[in-house]
Amino acid sequence: MKRNWCGASFDAIMLTFVRIVTMLISMVTFKVLAVTFSLEEYGTYASVMLVATTTVSLTVLGLTDAVNYFYVKELDSEKGKVY
C-alpha cells in the first residue's frame, strides 16, 4: 500500500516542525545578539524589532490567512490562481 504524503495531518506535522526550527533559530539568534551587543544596543534593537513586528502584524490583519484559505478552497479553478 503506497502512502500519499498529503493531507491535513501531514501539513500539521510540517507546520509544527517549521515552528520548532524557527523557535530554536530565534533563541540562538537572541543569545548571540545579547552577548555581542551592549545592554543599551540590545535594548534599542529589541525596541525597534517590537515596533516593526507590531506594525507588520497590524498592517497585514490576517491577509495571509485569508489568501491561504481562499487559495486552498479554490485550488483547481482559475479563481484560485487569481487569489
Image (cartoon, helix red, strand yellow):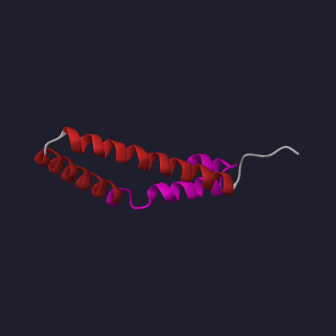
Image quarter in which the N terminus is found: top right
Residue placed most toward the observer, 41 or 81: 41
Q: Is residue 7 magenta?
A: no
Q: Residues in magenta?
A: 58-83
Number of marks present in the image shown: 0
State the image coordinates of residue 68 (x, y, percent, origin top left): 55, 54
Q: Is residue 72 magenta?
A: yes
What residue do we see at 65% from left, 54% from top?
Answer: 74
Residue placed most toward the observer, 69 or 25: 25
- Position of 33 compared to 65: left or right? left
What residue do we see at 42% from left, 50% from top?
Answer: 23
State the image coordinates of residue 51 (x, y, percent, origin top left): 23, 55
Among the 4 quarters of the image, the one containing residue 32: top left
- Position of 16 compared to 73: left or right? left
> Residue extending furthest top?
36
> Residue extending furthest right?
1
Q: Is residue 1 above or below residue 53?
A: above
Q: Is residue 56 visible?
A: yes
State the image coordinates of residue 35 (x, y, percent, origin top left): 22, 41
- Position of 81 compared to 36: left or right? right
State the image coordinates of residue 15 (x, y, percent, origin top left): 56, 52
What residue do we see at 17% from left, 41% from top?
Answer: 37
- Predominant SS along the magenta part: helix
Q: Is residue 83 visible?
A: no
